[in-house]
Amino acid sequence: MTKTIAISFLIAAVTSFSYAAEKYDTKALRTVQKMCTSCHGTPFYMAKQIEEEDWEFYFETPGKLEKMHKDKPEALASLKSSLFKKRKDRMLKFFIDNSEFSGAVNGCDANFCGTTH
């Protein structure tokens, strides 16, 4: 009986901790940090600059991101990379979830702290 209660409690604790630990997609956050931070600042700062509809427009209009970054060779290389192509949908969801009117206000944690722009 005691083992059953302990196992049930352990499963509930692990499940709730793993859910609470990630308020956002850390893989998308890391990708944005790697590819965009040098020009645009931190991912959350970047996401808050425009609205959800604008993020969708930029990501879903073919060639729009490339046209916006045409004078920046480093940015074009990032947009053409396999990593960007593979994680484009996750990055878009991250930007939408943290966009200007999303209501998300992320504080300091192990992945992000402060704003550099």
Image (spheres, helix red, strand yellow):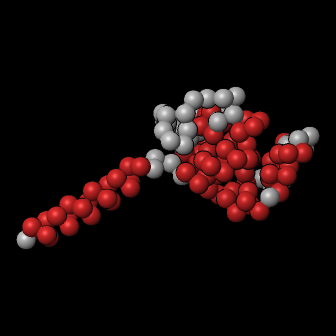
53 on left or right of 17: right
18 on left or right of 26: left
In the picture, the quarter occupied by the N terminus is bottom left
In this view, 115 is above or below 47: above
Pinpoint residue 2: horizontal percent, then vertical percent: 9, 67
* Most distant residue in the left direction: 1
Residue at 61% in and 52% down: 28
In this view, 52 is above or below 1: above
In this view, 39 is above or below 34: above
Camera-nearest residue between 104 and 81: 81
Residue 53 in view in this figure? no
Residue at 77% in and 36% down: 39
In the picture, the quarter occupied by the C terminus is top right
Residue at 70% in and 63% down: 86
Camera-nearest residue between 69 and 15: 15
91 on left or right of 97: right
Pinpoint residue 50: horizontal percent, then vertical percent: 66, 35
Please tell me in which quadrant of the rendered image residue 48 appears.
Answer: top right
Pinpoint residue 31: horizontal percent, then vertical percent: 66, 51
Residue at 34% in and 53% down: 17
Residue 80 in view in this figure? yes
